Image (cartoon, rainbow, N blue to C red):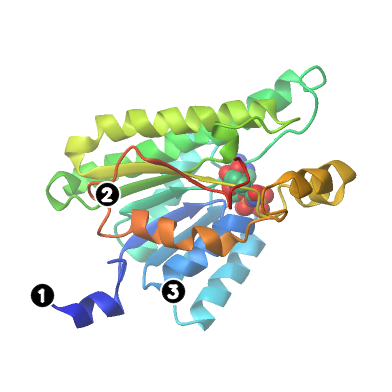
Amino acid sequence: MSVAGASSDPYGLYGVGVLVTGASSGLGAHFAKILAAQGAKVGVAARRRDRLGQLVDAISAAGGHAAALTLDVQDEGSIIAGFDAAEAALGPIDVVVNNAGINARGLATDISAADFDQVMAVNVRGVFLCAREGARRMIARGSRRSERGRVINIASIGAHTVLPGLTAYCASKAAVAMMTRSLAREWARQGISVNALCPGYVETEINASWLQEEGGQRMVQGFPRRRLMRADAIDNSLLFLAGAHSTATTGAIITIDDGQSL
Ligand SMILES: NC(=O)c1ccc[n+]([C@@H]2O[C@H](COP(=O)([O-])OP(=O)(O)OC[C@H]3O[C@@H](n4cnc5c(N)ncnc54)[C@H](OP(=O)(O)O)[C@@H]3O)[C@@H](O)[C@H]2O)c1
């Protein structure tokens, strides 16, 4: 057994094609960088092309390999075109990180039907369409034999914990958790592992203004460790799930929240 090989590529990600949605900011940009640092070829997908260009430049400057893909997860045609562009630029995509997400903050009595629908369209339907497109391609390429297909859905502690003022968001993330288990069951014999990560609060564009408000600061003081989590707390779990050693891990819903939901 070669220990040297294992240490130079501990997660088995070197040369693997990965597509990360919602990579133009926050967690998605962070995930793209850490995957590229492990030698993965990373398609970075979102709507804001300028942000993606800057991310590709940063990854390239660090010696990594990435391509920018303009993709709206609400639009099925855009998803298919995004996968086509990713595979043309990087080769086969064997790992999909479904990270794009939005919220709609407010009392349930105030939230509009349009806001509710949009949260579901991005956080649930978008995750389904990207997982389905990735899986169709993995299966056609022989993931059943290689057992190398991976779908990682970024849910939230909101999948299992009430986050006040975020009813639509929490409902959408609970749906993502159940969808993860359902897809994991369906694709188990197709060699595709499907898992979800449920991060706690990390400061990003989705929550920065709320975290500055009094309510947000009170919430943080109510966490057992009285602090927000850092994005890099998720790194090892994400890399493990994306990599070669997670074949037997499928249908898992993994909470990484610094104890915030306890
Ligand atoms: N930060 C946290 O505390 C936290 C905790 C738990 C879970 N999460 C989850 O982590 C994921 C990333 O969130 P974040 O915190 O990094 O927030 P963020 O900085 O606001 O990033 C959200 C990303 O989603 C993309 N996006 C939104 N709508 C899209 C669409 N229709 N098509 C394609 N991309 C779209 C945005 O890019 P464009 O606007 O350029 O399209 C952006 O890159 C989300 O699913 C979120 O629910 C976050």
Disc 3 residue type (three-letter):
Ala
Q: Nearer the viewer, residue 175 or 226?
A: 226
Residue 117, percent from left and from top: 64, 24
Front-lying residue, 81 or 174:
174
Residue 144 found in image quarter: top left
Q: Element at badge 1?
A: loop
**Residue for badge 2:** 149
Q: Is residue 208 left or right of residue 260?
A: right
Residue 212 lies, with reference to residue 173, above or below; the image says below
| Local SS, label 3 | helix
Q: Nearer the viewer, mark 2 or mark 1?
A: 1
Nearer to us in this view, 227 or 148: 227
Q: Is residue 169 visible?
A: yes
* N-terminal label among 2 and 3: 3
Of pointers 2 and 1, the one earlier in the residue sequence? 1
Inspect the image, locate mark 1, and give the three-letter code of the amino acid beneath it: Met
Residue 252 occupies which quadrant of the picture? top left
Position of the C terminus, as image quadrant, is: top right
What amino acid type is highlighted by mark number 2?
Answer: Gly
Q: Please give the residue where the numbered disc 3 appears in the rendered image.
A: 37
Between discs 1 and 3, the one toward the N terminus = 1
Q: Which residue is mark 1?
A: 1
Residue drawn at x 25%, y 59% as measured from the top left: 244
Q: Are marks 1 and 3 in contact (CB under 8 Å)?
A: no
